[in-house]
Amino acid sequence: METATAVIAIATLVLTVLACVAQWMVVPEFRRRFGLPDPPEAVTRGVKKLGTFTRTFLGSKPAADAGDAVPQPLVGAGGAAVAAATAPQRPAAAWVLLLADDVRTHGLPEELRRKLERRARDRTLKAFSFTGDGRGWLMLYGHNGFSGDRLPPELREELERANRTRSEIADVAFGPDGAWLLLLGDGTLVSRHLPAALAGKLEGYRRSGSPVRQVALGPDGGWVVLRGANGFSHEAIPPALDGRLIECNRSRQEIRRVELLANGGWLLLHGHDGVAAEGLPEVAGAAVAHCRKCGADLRAGSFGGRALA
């Protein structure tokens, strides 16, 4: 009897440990709660496949993966619900949300995640972007500091030149087919491989002396240019986003930031703390809603990355 009791106790302990290991591998919230590092992506994929295989043969329906888009309400300004995209899609596996003094991340290596957290805590983190192919990344901090991996060589040269000359690096945008744009603090724009319509629009703004505040490049070829407090121009963006931008302009709300995602997804930050979005990855959408509920100051987001962990 004592032997049987001991065997049961050991089995229970082993199952508990295995359950914790499984949660560490596939549940990002579990890792963040206990300060655990992200597991290798190959291990995570293997655990998910094993879970799907097991559920299939047990006759139960697999749960939706965190990477699958699920229709969800996001809280907008004044508590209004913002509908998420309903079309099924497979969003990128890595994303980052920048807050005033914190970050929310998914699919990043532990070292990069901790670096972002340190910069966010000391309030020097300015921006974070994935490259157009989703394999590289760029972090901007302070006046002209930067750190990145797998950046286009010409862009790295421009960033190093700005750093040497102490020019402010205001923002960087990446698009498809190797497109990128560097915005300096004095309004100077340096770019490569932009769509012809966008390049022409930016040249017109340069000649007229109209400063550009942000350029958002979408993975599907769309783009948005922000000027002044609420001026904008765009091409090939979702009608819902167009409507929101017009609404902000007419009501004289500041358009703080626009992010364009694959398959028609988008994120718009406006006014003091207004947020509107469609088609965010499920976990990212939940994180945005949580930030709004807690009154966190959401500054920007980047959703175009592949799993880098």
Image (cartoon, rainbow, N blue to C red):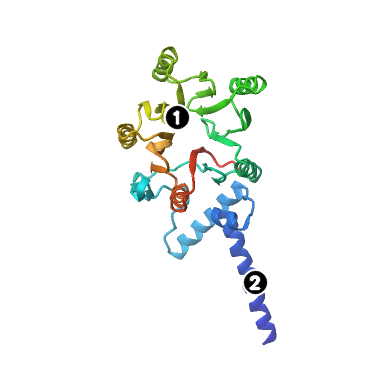
Residue 192 point in image, percent of width and height? 51, 19
Q: Amino acid at mark 2?
A: Leu
Image position of 260 with respect to 162: above or below? below
Q: Which residue is mark 1?
A: 216
Q: Residue at x 64, y 51 (%)?
A: 37
> In front: 81, or 192?
81
Q: Amino acid at mark 1?
A: Ala
Residue 224 point in image, percent of width and height? 40, 28
Q: Residue at x 42, y 60 (%)?
A: 61
Q: Which mark is residue 13?
A: 2
Q: Nearer the viewer, mark 2 or mark 1?
A: 1
Q: In this rendering, would 250 be left or right of 66?
A: left
Residue 257 point in image, percent of width and height? 44, 34
Q: Which corner quadrant of the image does residue 162 belong to?
A: top right
Q: Residues within 10 Å of mark 2 (few under 14, many from 20)?
A: few
Q: In this rendering, would 212 be left or right of 151?
A: left
Residue at the far top in the pictured view = 207
> In front: 249, or 43?
249
